[in-house]
Amino acid sequence: MMSKSSFSFFFDSVTKAMNEDGVHEFDNIQIEGSDRKEVFTANLTFEAILPENFQEKVVICCLDILSKEENKKIHKHTKDEGYEERIQKLESEVIKYKKILQRYEVEDNERVREMNNKNRDIMVSNEELQSTNEELQSVNVELHTVNAELQHKNKQLAVANNDISNLLKSTNIGTIFIDKNLKIRRFTPAVKKQFNIIESDIGRSITTFSSNVLDIDIDDVCRKVLDTTEPIRQVVADNNGKEYLMRASLYRTIDDEINGVVLTFVDLSKTKTMLKKYDHTIEETANKFNAIFENSKNTMLFIDEKGIIQSANGPFAGEEQSDLVNKSIFELGSNGELNTLKKTISQVFKEQNFKTADVEFDEQSLYYKLDLVPIDKDKLTDRKPLVCIIGYDNSNEQNYLRSLENTKDTFTSFMDNAQHQMVLLNDKGEIVYINSDKSSPLTKEQLIGSTIYDQIPPDQVASYRRSIEEIFEGISNSKISFVYEFPDGRIEDVSVMATPVVINGDIEYVALIGNPL
């Protein structure tokens, strides 16, 4: 180990070699041990070099130790020449370099702290970068999704554009789209009959083109539509004498903003031909309907929603044809009779469906079966909706049925008050009516509708059935006899008088008249 002064010399030499280039030589330098008992003299050489693959310099020190005789001479010579002064100087330098080393240590620690802080900042920045990277990846995924949607919308837009292009090219209606500044936006090929324009004219003002339409200022028409926001319809003619229906209307965006004018020209030559055919068909249909209306045996009335009769082809409900027009159908009878009809007519107007109704006018003894037919179901027409009432006068049938009911009531009253048991049979042997259940365990209501053959002994059914069938066949057989066992066990010979009941020349029933009640 070296003494403190020797170490200080070595430190100064190394520092000088690090700071200054070249070889630094020191001759006859005394080097002491740490106990200062051993002293030897040496020549020293210091040189700083930068080896390959090293980042810092390295100091090489060469030590040449002198012999003892030379050492003694030098030691004797130098010991007297300010040795103590040199020692003090070296100690002060050691103290100075200690302070420098301490300062360097503090600076190094500060640099380490700064590096640690920077490292933490870098780590935070790295985490932020990773988070940003994840967000960018998420945004990238969303961008891919949006891109796919945009591609899909572009395809849809292309399809829609193709459809519009084909529609414009295929339509026979001349159409031209004009913006607010009256510049051409788009047009159909058919409009070239009115304007001499080509595709390259899109973007030019419509006022710079001459028109084949006579007596019309297109500029004024477009400006009027833009100013008033009202469409213009007008029949116009071209230089060739052809007529067109011109319509100028506003060009509106999806957001309902006014962005120009649309002009259309519809060729009326084919339309006129179709209208003539249509008018002929309408006239033919009207003639057929008038023939039916005027010559129908059934009354036909046309009424409005208030029930006012607009027209009639004959008398109805006791009123003459001339008195029916402009009269309410609900005034033709009492309210009680026509309340149901009023509800039915209201339903027909509301539901626009065919319905039927039966109406009775007691005061005139008139009966009508009515068919109610809705007319003018098209809501777009200016005509008011009507209902056609077709009346079938069935007064004779109703009166005949009423007379039959009266006859039936008379007949049943006669049977119920007869002194003999009476039974009315049809051709199947079913009891249509019986005036008494005295000889049967069944009630009168149970007997009506049952078969007479179930009420007699089984061994006598065949002969009894044959006797009744002969009467229906027109063979006279006025008396039928059979043995009948009463509920109380009595057995008695029963004889009944049988007579046919003729209606409209045909035998409809057989009446059996038995013993007195």
Image (cartoon, rainbow, N blue to C red):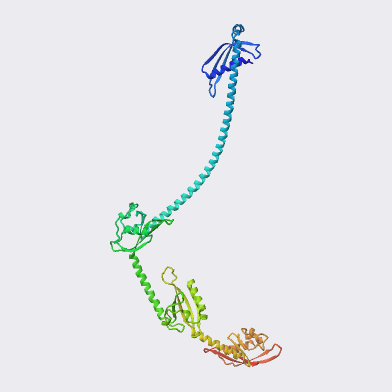
Quadrant of residue 480 within the rendered picture: bottom right
Q: Nearer the viewer, residue 372 or 109?
A: 109
Relative image position of residue 138 (x, y in whole percent): 53, 44
In the rendered image, the quadrant that contains the C terminus is bottom right
Relative image position of residue 116 (x, y in whole percent): 58, 32
Q: Nearer the viewer, residue 236 or 477?
A: 236
Left or right of 361: which side holds 109? right
Relative image position of residue 233 (x, y in whole percent): 35, 63
- For the view shown, which residue lies furthest in the left direction? 239
* On screen, residue 293 above or below 110: below
Quadrant of residue 516 within the rendered picture: bottom right
Quadrant of residue 282 within the rendered picture: bottom left
Task: Using the rendered image of the protein, determine whether residue 87 is visible from the camera's viewpoint.
Answer: yes
Relative image position of residue 160 (x, y in whole percent): 43, 55
Left or right of 4: which side holds 186? left
Task: Using the rendered image of the protein, determine whether residue 470 is visible from the camera's viewpoint.
Answer: no
Q: Nearer the viewer, residue 259 or 501?
A: 259
In the rendered image, the quadrant that contains the N terminus is top right
